[in-house]
Image: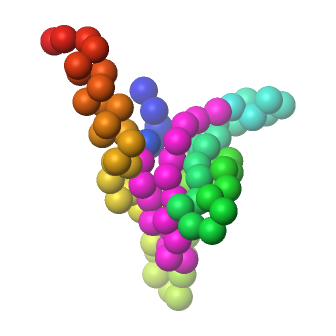
Amino acid sequence: MNPIALGLYHHYKGRQYEVIGFAKHSETLEDMVVYKALYGEGGTWVRPLSMWDNPIEVDGKTVARFEYVGEASGQLELAEGVKVIQPL
């Protein structure tokens, strides 16, 4: 089971990202989130899960660093394709 949902997230600074997977740091075994930017060149990044899920303070208010928006359209298409291949 994944620690957070795959899909679209809104960063508190206003940018959009898509969580595409999870990994472990090769030296520390720390859980990492693999995500890509949905702007500019769309780079792929990793961030420690502890930082992803950790609330932060902005202008005296506690906010989520990343807020889940919903499933990415590709995830929905993949899920529908799996249903077709593997009947219930």
Q: Quadrant of residue 31?
A: top right
Residue 45 on the magenta span: no
Q: Residue furthest top?
A: 87
Displayed quadrant of residue 76: top left
Kindly identify the residue that appears in the image at 44 percent across and 59 percent down.
9
Q: Is residue 47 visible?
A: no
Residue beneath the point at 57% across and 67% down: 39
In terms of depth relative to the viewer, which is nearer, 62 or 86?
Answer: 86
The residue segment tinted magenta is 7-23
Instruction: Using the image, determine if residue 70 lies above or below residue 62.
Output: above
Count of labels in the image: 0
The residue at the point 67 percent across, 56 percent down is: 43
Indicate whether residue 13 is drawn in magenta: yes
Residue that extends furthest to the bottom in the rendered view of this protein = 59
**Residue beneath the point at 59% across and 53% down:** 36
> At which x and y percent is residue 41?
66, 62
The answer, for residue 56, to whether it is visible in the render is: yes
In this view of the protein, which residue sits in the foreground, 43 or 60? 43
The color scheme shown is rainbow
Q: Which quadrant of the figure contains the N terminus?
A: top left
- Majority secondary structure of magenta residues: strand
Kindly indicate the quadrant of the structure image that contains residue 75. Answer: top left
State the image coordinates of residue 22 (x, y, percent, origin top left): 58, 35
Is 41 rendered above or below residue 46? below
- Measured as percent of width and height from the top left, residue 79 is found at 30, 30
Q: Is 73 placed above or below 42 here?
A: above
Q: Position of residue 37 (x, y in %)?
A: 58, 59
In the figure, is residue 4 to the left or right of 47? left
